[in-house]
Amino acid sequence: MKHTSVTLKEAKKKGEKISMLTAYDYSTAKLMDQAGIHSILVGDSLGMVMLGYEDTIPVTMEDMIHHTRAVARGAVNALVVSDMPFMAYHRSVSQAVENAGRLIKEGGAQAVKLEGGAEFCPEIRAIVRASIPVVGHLGLTPQSIHAFGGFKVQGKTLSAAQKLIEDAQALEDAGAFAVVLECIPAELAALISENINIPTIGIGSGAGCDGQVLVYQDMLGMYANFIPHFTKQFANVGKLMTEAFQRYISEVQAGVFPTPEHSFQMDKGILKQLYSEKEEPA
Ligand code: KIV
């Protein structure tokens, strides 16, 4: 079954939890899709886990389109959501619509995500008016790390919690079909989830959200630079990969790989002729 912005909203109504993971390439997207994931987020976290930047700030529209295209080819049933990178929607409403359109038209995404609360409602309204489904993103919004002073849990004071509750409502009113809640207290995320009609997708925000999202390198132990406290490692693929790489290196060095089984054989007669030609005097 193809998951869409509509089926995700229906899932919340039916009390079914939504599963989302990030992916940035064709093969990973295909594996997730075959596993039955509801939605794949081409997050601008790709700046860190795929491109090796310290944060998501340097990610460009070209980066997002390139990776979104690959994911869209691998995702048959999953809803593909593509992140709008830093400064791709901050300058004007028309810039936001233009860039959201590029992620759909050139990237093949079926929805876009952008960070920010009530202050970005004009942009969200305009993108939704262009028939592009929008996911909001509140709490620890990584594009604002310089304003936050680092990767810190958000919404811990009364005023900050009230602002998040209001922002979530504003996003729903502006037409967003879902909202990611990143690194906010579990009780607050549960309250927001009860207050609004669109699904909340939590990351580090507890079990009261309507769905969950994780960065796949984090849940597979493939990115050791920064391991968020909220991440659960579902498999240590990073360790498996390192061990496989080491085995490959030692087999190549020892001449154990490749064996005839991993090689192509030649017609013996032709081979004989090649050798005799080589041996003929010049
Ligand atoms: O960029 C990303 O991967 C995200 C998730 C962490 C929600 O925004």
Image: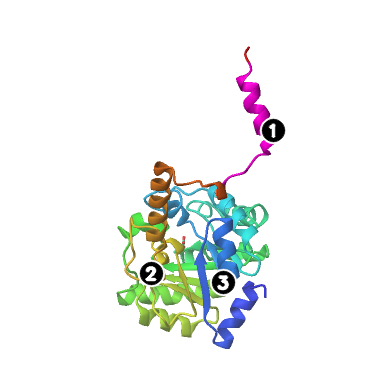
Cα separation, mark 3 vs mark 1, equals 48 Å
Disc 2 crowd rating (10 Å Cα; few below 14, some 14-19, many 20+) is: some
Compared to residue 66, the image places residue 190 above or below, namely below
Q: Which of 241 and 71 is in front in this view?
A: 241
Check whether the beta carbons of the residues at disc 2 and disc 3 lie within 8 A of each other: no
Q: Horizontal placement of 260 versus 242: left or right? A: right
The residue that disc 1 covers is 270
Q: Quadrant of residue 263?
A: top right
The local secondary structure at tag 3 comes to helix
Q: How many marks?
A: 3
Confirm whether the magenta stretch covers residue 226: no
Q: Quadrant of residue 242?
A: bottom left
Q: From the image, state whether disc 3 or disc 1 is nearer to you.
A: 1
Confirm whether the magenta stretch covers residue 276: yes
Compared to residue 243, the image places residue 117 above or below, namely below
The residue that disc 2 covers is 233
Q: Nearer the viewer, residue 237 or 247?
A: 247
Q: Residue at position x 65%, y 33% from top?
A: 271
Q: From the image, state whether disc 1 or disc 2 is nearer to you.
A: 1
Q: Residue at position x 48%, y 84% from top?
A: 195
Q: Where is residue 88 in the image (x, y as percent from the top left)?
A: 53, 52
The residue that disc 3 covers is 35
Tell me which amino acid carries mark 2: Gln
